[in-house]
Image (cartoon, grey):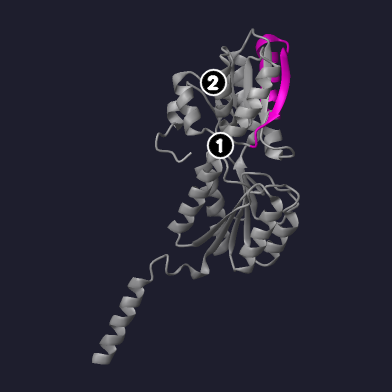
Amino acid sequence: MKNTFSILMSGAALLLCLTPAAMAADCKVGLTMPSLNAPYFAAQVAAVEAAAKEKGCEITTADSQSDFSKQISDIEDMVAKGVQILIVNPRDQEALVATVDAASKAGVKVVVMDSTLNPKANVITQVRSSSDENGRLVGDWIAKKMKGTPIKMLLLSGNQGNPGGLERRMGVVKGIVEGQLVNEGAVNLQILGQGWGDWATDGGLKAAEDLLQAHPDANLIVGENDSMVLGAAQAVKAAGLKDILLTAAADGQREALEMIKDGTYGATGLNDPDLVGRTAFDIGYKAFKGELPADLPKLYLTPADVISKDNVDKYYNPKSVF
């Protein structure tokens, strides 16, 4: 009887020790990012890591440092170490396809997050905000805001060949053109120049400095994310220029929303890194558990919106990581 009691107590003690972290051996997650150079990416990492830990999963995160060959190597290393769930924010839409396909073939549940991967890739789904729709909504807002004024735009783009960036800027252009046609019956838009800011504040500052020097008559700056436009705001202030409307196709970064609140920044598109990151992990985890719905689309888009002074309080969180 004493031995039976001792065994039962030992078993109870063992169960008490099996916290989610201790039971995580069969739930290993890999997260690979194109860069951590922008606050948006850091916020995505925080969201995925938090979601994984809530489920008791062990997670490994890798920063490709804007090098797709390193990202390929990172993915291969994660697969070799036995990850069951892989969340990929790809640096390049083509270069990673073969590596991702190999991971899926090995039984890893692969979800693409935020940036685009060629649709032929064998993944569960791709999770991101609607770059085109966010851009279009921002463009429509610009057309209304600048009604009656010829638009002279400077464009700040992330990196060449990025399909998400292309969707964002063309969405804005489409929104402006359609908005001007509806509101004014004609299009009066000039894109004076394009600069490349690598999605970062410092990059946006440098690109904006060069563009403003070449085009001091610009009255609108559109960035493909908030971080670059925050850099452009510094350039505008340093140049002593006024009457330049600052806008971004996407993100909703805390500092940008603060400037929207005080009227020094026009609008941005809704691209919540926490929502995108948690959604990507949740889909990967359900696939791992065999609980995916049969009708899950190959492209999963989070809701779109334009954030301006009219609705900024709905989205502003002073404690946000991003």
Q: Quadrant of residue 166?
A: top right
Q: Amino acid at mark 1?
A: Asn
The residue lying toward the viewer, choosing from 225 and 306, is 225
- The structure residue drawn at horizontal position 48% and vertical position 18%, both measured from the top left corner, is 263
**Residue 127: within the magenta?**
no
The residue lying toward the viewer, choosing from 34 and 112, is 34
Magenta residues span: 170-198
Mark whose residue sits in front, 1 or 2: 2
Q: Secondary structure at mark 2?
A: loop
Q: Secondary structure at mark 1?
A: loop
Q: In which quadrant will I find the N terminus?
A: bottom left
Q: Which mark is residue 271?
A: 1
Q: Amino acid at mark 2?
A: Gly
Looking at the image, is 104 positioned above or below residue 244? below
Looking at the image, is 301 positioned above or below residue 259? below
State yes or no: discs 1 and 2 in contact (Cβ < 8 Å).
no
Residue 128 vs residue 119: left or right? left
From the top left corner, tell me how far across and down residue 163 is, in percent: 71, 39
Q: First in sequence: mark 1 or mark 2?
A: 2
Looking at the image, is 25 positioned above or below residue 210? below
Instruction: Work out whether residue 53 can be spotted.
Output: yes
**Residue 182: within the magenta?**
yes
* Alpha carbon distance from label 1 to label 2: 16 Å
Instruction: Work out whether residue 249 can be spotted.
Output: no
Q: Quadrant of residue 211?
A: top right
